Image (spheres, rainbow, N blue to C red):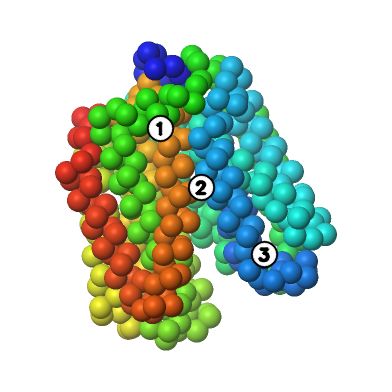
C-alpha cells in the first residue's frame, strides 16, 4: 500500500506479463477450491471428526472472519516486503492449511487450519488488484482481471461436484491432500513467472480511513456490500428453492449448479468486452438483471427448465460483478489499489455473512420464495446506490 501522496501504481514491465497473470489465476483456483471444500464434504468431515455438522460448518465461518481481518491489515503487516514473496507466502499458507485439515484429529485442528486458509485468502485478494496493475498495461487490466477471476469460476465448477465425487472415492482427508497438490503447483508456477514486485511507499492503517473519505469511495463500497449481500442471500439458499419449489432431486440440483458454474466461467471471459465499452454500464446493468432474475423466480419459479435457465443466467451475469468492481478500484484508486482491494474484500466478506444470515432467517419466516424476493429488493437498492451515489469513472482502454 502506498502512502496518501503517492501517484498511480507503476508498471513493473513495459510488456504484459501474461505468464504471471496466469499464475495468479492458478493461485485463485487453488485458494477458492480449498475454500469451497468444507461445504462439499461437510457430512463425511463431521462424521470423521465426530462433531456435529453445525460445528463443522464453522470452518466456513472462521475462514470468512479471518479473511475480513486480514484484508484490512495485510498491507501494514507486510510493508516493505517484495509482493512476489508475499504472494508466494500465501500459497505456502494454503499448503500448510490443507495439510493441517487433512490430518486434523478434531475440531480445534480443523479450525486452526481454516484460520491459515482465511489469512491466505484475504491477503491474496487484497493484493491481487494492485499486483495485476503492475503486470500489464492499463488497457489490458480488464482482460487480466477476467483471466484471474476465471480461476474463481473454474473452482466453482470444480470444487463442489468434484470434491463430493472424490470424497466418496478417497475420503475427505484424501481430497484435502489433493488440494495440497494444487497449492504446490500454484507455488511452483508463481516462482517461475512472477517478477520482482518491490513494495512501494508506506503502509498505515489510517490510509484505509483516508481512502474511505474520498468522494464516491465510501458509497461505492456500500454498493459492493449491497450487491454481494443480495447475491449471497440468493445463492446460499438455491438448494432449498430447487428442492421445495422447483421440485428436483439431488441429481437435478447437481446438474443445475453445474450449469451455473459453466455459465459463470463463460461470463468471466465475456465481461471484459462489456467493461471496455462502458464500465458504468456494467456496474448498473449487472445488478439490475440479477434483481430481475431474483424477482421473477420468487414470483413465477417452479418450472424446472425455466429455473435452470434462470440460475444459469445468474451465473453468467454475476461473473461480471467482481471483475467490474475490481476494474472500478483500479480507476477510482490508482494510487491506493491495495487499500481499495482490502476494503472491497472486507465488504464482500461482511456481505457473505450478512446475506447468508438474513437469508436463513427469511427461509424460516417466508420460505424460499421470500428469500429470493428480498434478494431482488437488496439488488435494486444496489442499483440505485450506483446510479445516484457512485462517481462515474472515465472508461479507459
Q: Of the two numbered discs 3 and 1 on the same chain, state the one appearing first in sequence.
A: 3
Question: Dot 3 lies on which element?
Answer: helix
> Residue 378: which disc?
none
* Residue picked out by circle 2: 151
Residue sticking out furthest to the left: 388
Q: Is residue 18 left or right of residue 190?
A: left
Marks 1,2: beta carbons within 8 A: no
Q: Is residue 251 left or right of residue 358?
A: right
Q: Residue 340's mark?
A: 1
Circle 1 Cα neighbour tier, 10 Å, few/some/many (<14 / 14–19 / ≥20): many
Residue 163 appears in the figure: no
Q: Quadrant of residue 245?
A: bottom left
Q: Locate residue 184, reporting x and y percent.
A: 70, 41
Q: How dense is the environment of label 3, judged by Cα within 10 Å: few (below 14), some, or many (20 and up)? A: many
For residue 371, above or below residue 178: below
Mark drawn on residue 56: 3
Q: Residue at x 67, y 65 (%)?
A: 55
Mark 2 or mark 3, which is nearer to you?
A: 3
Residue found at the far bottom of this picture: 247
Residue 19: x and y, percent?
A: 53, 31
Of 219 and 33, nearer the camera is: 219
Q: Residues within 10 Å of mark 2 (few under 14, many from 20)?
A: many
Residue 187 in sight from this viewpoint: yes
The disc, 2 or 3, on the residue closer to the chain's N-terminal end is 3
Distance between the Cα atoms at labels 3 and 1? 32 Å
Amino acid at each position: 500500500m502506498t502512502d496518501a501522496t503517492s501517484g498511480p501504481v507503476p508498471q513493473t514491465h513495459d510488456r504484459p506479463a501474461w505468464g504471471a497473470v496466469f499464475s495468479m489465476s492458478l493461485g485463485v483456483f487453488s485458494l477458492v477450491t480449498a475454500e469451497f471444500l468444507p461445504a462439499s464434504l461437510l457430512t463425511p468431515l463431521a462424521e470423521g471428526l465426530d462433531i456435529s455438522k453445525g460445528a463443522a460448518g464453522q470452518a466456513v465461518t472462521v475462514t470468512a472472519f479471518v479473511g475480513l481481518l486480514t484484508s484490512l491489515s495485510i498491507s501494514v503487516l507486510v510493508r516493505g516486503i517484495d509482493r512476489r514473496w508475499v504472494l508466494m507466502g500465501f500459497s505456502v499458507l494454503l499448503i500448510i492449511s490443507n495439510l493441517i485439515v487433512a490430518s486434523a484429529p478434531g475440531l480445534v485442528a480443523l479450525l486452526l487450519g481454516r484460520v491459515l486458509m482465511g489469512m491466505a485468502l484475504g491477503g491474496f485478494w487484497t493484493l491481487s488488484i494492485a499486483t495485476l496493475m503492475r503486470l500489464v498495461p492499463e488497457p489490458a487490466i480488464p482482460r487480466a482481471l477476467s483471466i484471474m477471476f476465471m480461476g474463481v469460476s473454474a473452482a466453482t465448477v470444480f470444487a463442489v461436484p468434484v470434491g463430493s465425487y472424490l470424497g466418496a472415492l478417497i475420503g475427505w482427508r484424501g481430497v484435502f491432500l489433493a488440494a495440497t497438490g494444487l497449492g504446490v503447483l500454484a507455488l511452483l508456477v508463481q516462482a517461475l513467472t512472477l517478477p520482482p514486485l518491490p513494495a512501494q511507499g508506506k503502509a498505515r492503517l489510517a490510509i484505509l480511513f483516508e481512502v474511505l473519505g474520498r468522494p464516491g469511495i465510501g458509497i461505492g463500497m456500500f454498493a459492493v456490500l449491497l450487491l454481494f449481500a443480495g447475491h449471497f442471500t440468493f445463492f446460499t439458499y438455491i438448494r432449498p428453492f430447487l428442492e421445495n419449489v422447483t421440485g428436483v432431486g439431488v441429481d437435478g440440483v447437481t446438474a443445475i449448479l453445474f450449469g451455473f458454474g459453466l455459465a459463470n466461467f463463460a461470463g468471466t471471459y465475456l465481461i471484459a468486452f462489456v467493461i471496455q465499452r462502458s464500465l458504468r454500464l456494467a456496474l448498473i446493468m449487472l445488478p439490475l438483471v440479477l434483481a430481475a432474475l431474483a424477482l421473477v423466480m420468487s414470483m413465477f419459479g417452479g418450472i424446472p427448465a425455466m429455473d435452470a435457465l434462470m440460475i444459469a443466467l445468474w451465473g453468467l451475469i454475476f461473473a461480471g460483478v467482481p471483475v467490474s468492481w475490481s476494474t472500478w478500484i483500479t480507476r477510482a484508486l490508482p494510487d491506493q489499489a491495495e487499500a481499495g482491494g482490502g476494503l472491497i474484500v472486507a465488504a464482500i466478506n461482511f456481505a457473505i455473512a450478512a446475506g447468508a444470515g438474513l437469508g436463513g432467517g427469511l427461509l424460516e419466516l417466508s420460505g424460499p420464495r421470500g428469500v429470493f424476493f428480498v434478494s431482488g429488493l437488496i439488488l435494486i437498492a444496489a442499483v440505485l446506490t450506483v446510479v445516484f451515489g457512485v462517481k462515474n469513472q472515465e472508461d479507459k482502454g
